[in-house]
């Protein structure tokens, strides 16, 4: 199956490489944007690695990286990925700042993962904008750059052409979010399946759950239950019925569910239903009434209400924007 881009162009993605490179964050960008994906058709991303330092480049863990070119690759990139920087307070070279400023001025998208946000901040790209980073760095980011509206405890922030994410794994969520923007939900789901990760986590989801890790035997009950709810999202799901299916008392179930997901069953189910509605809006011409039914909202009125509360827009406006790419 082919997933043609919503836009009649082929995006070029350039990920930065440097000495002391954060290997995991770099690998996320390579995995999402750099792997050949023939099932996506000819419009899939063109990918390159740009070295901002003279080689050889030594990544964390003793890995050496060979780049496709130098900083000049940034000049023609549609999307630039800045992995975690080598230190939150570490100097950002002037030639990198100038390259990113030039890319931003011509409309390129610039994406940071974890402490990579400090590179964007040093280049002045986040002034008077919202941004996020790993929870360990939020206070330092606010202190160093008071004109940035730092959004704490979220996975990522999309400001149009400037996108920032929290630590490590949240960078994967942001990369998949960008795939959704460019190619739609079906393509993002396909990439996520190959990665064996959830296809979509909302940017506003919390980074850190200050709760104990559930016991293994309890996790083995909750995980299949979540799959069951996803597979039967159109059904009504009463807490008593879910607790019974999980083999727990209602009180224990509510406590363990929140330990496992960070939220209540009703809020988790609502987020899943909104995600299903978004997929159907992006990938079909179904009526709002039919989508509301399939996503478990029961009525178009309920879908519109929750969509506006969570997404800040209506289902039809969202569909029109998705179709325009």
Image: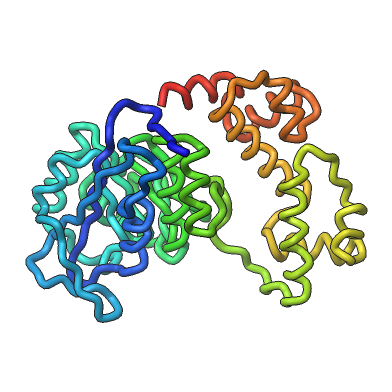
Residue in the picture at 77% in, 44% down: 232
Residue in the picture at 76% in, 31% down: 297
- In the rendered image, the residue lying farthest to the bottom is 62
Q: Quadrant of residue 166?
A: bottom left
Position in image of residue 111 (x %, y %): 32, 48
Position in image of residue 64 (x %, y %): 20, 74
Quadrant where the C terminus sits is top left
29 left or right, relative to 64: right
Q: Nearer the viewer, residue 172 or 283?
A: 283
249 left or right, relative to 161: right
Q: Is residue 19 visible?
A: yes
Q: Nearer the viewer, residue 255 or 54?
A: 54
**Numbered disc total:** 0
1 left or right, relative to 47: right
Q: Is residue 302 above or below residue 242?
A: above
Q: Quadrant of residue 63?
A: bottom left
């Amino acid at each position: 199956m082919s997933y043609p881009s919503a836009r009649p162009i082929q995006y070029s993605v350039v990920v930065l490489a440097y000495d002391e490179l954060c290997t995991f964050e770099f690998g996320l960008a390579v995995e999402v944007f750099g792997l050949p994906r023939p099932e996506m058709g000819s419009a899939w991303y063109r990918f390159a690695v740009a070295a901002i330092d003279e080689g050889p480049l030594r990544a964390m863990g003793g890995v050496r990286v060979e780049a496709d070119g130098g900083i000049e690759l940034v000049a023609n990139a549609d999307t630039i990925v800045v992995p975690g920087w080598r230190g939150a307070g570490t100097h950002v070279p002037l030639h990198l700042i100038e390259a990113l400023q030039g890319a931003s001025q011509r409309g390129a998208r610039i994406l940071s993962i974890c402490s990579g946000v400090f590179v964007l901040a040093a280049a002045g790209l986040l002034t008077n904008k919202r941004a996020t980073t790993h929870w360990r760095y939020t206070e330092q980011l606010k202190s160093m750059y008071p004109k940035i509206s730092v959004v704490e405890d979220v996975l990522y922030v999309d400001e149009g052409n400037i996108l920032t994410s929290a630590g490590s794994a949240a960078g994967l969520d942001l990369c998949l979010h960008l795939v959704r923007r460019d190619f739609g939900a079906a393509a993002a789901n396909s990439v996520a399946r190959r990665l064996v990760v959830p296809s979509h986590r909302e940017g506003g989801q919390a980074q850190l759950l200050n709760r104990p890790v559930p016991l293994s035997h309890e996790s083995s009950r909750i995980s299949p239950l979540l799959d069951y709810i996803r597979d039967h999202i159109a059904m009504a799901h009463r807490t008593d019925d879910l607790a019974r299916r999980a083999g727990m008392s209602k009180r224990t179930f509510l406590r363990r569910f929140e330990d496992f997901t960070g939220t209540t069953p009703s809020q988790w189910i609502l987020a899943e239903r909104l995600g299903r509605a978004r997929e159907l809006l992006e990938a079909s011409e179904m009526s709002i009434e039919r989508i509301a039914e399939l996503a478990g909202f029961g009525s178009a009125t309920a879908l519109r209400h929750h969509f506006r509360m969570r997404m800040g827009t209506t289902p039809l406006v969202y569909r029109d924007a998705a179709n325009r790419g």
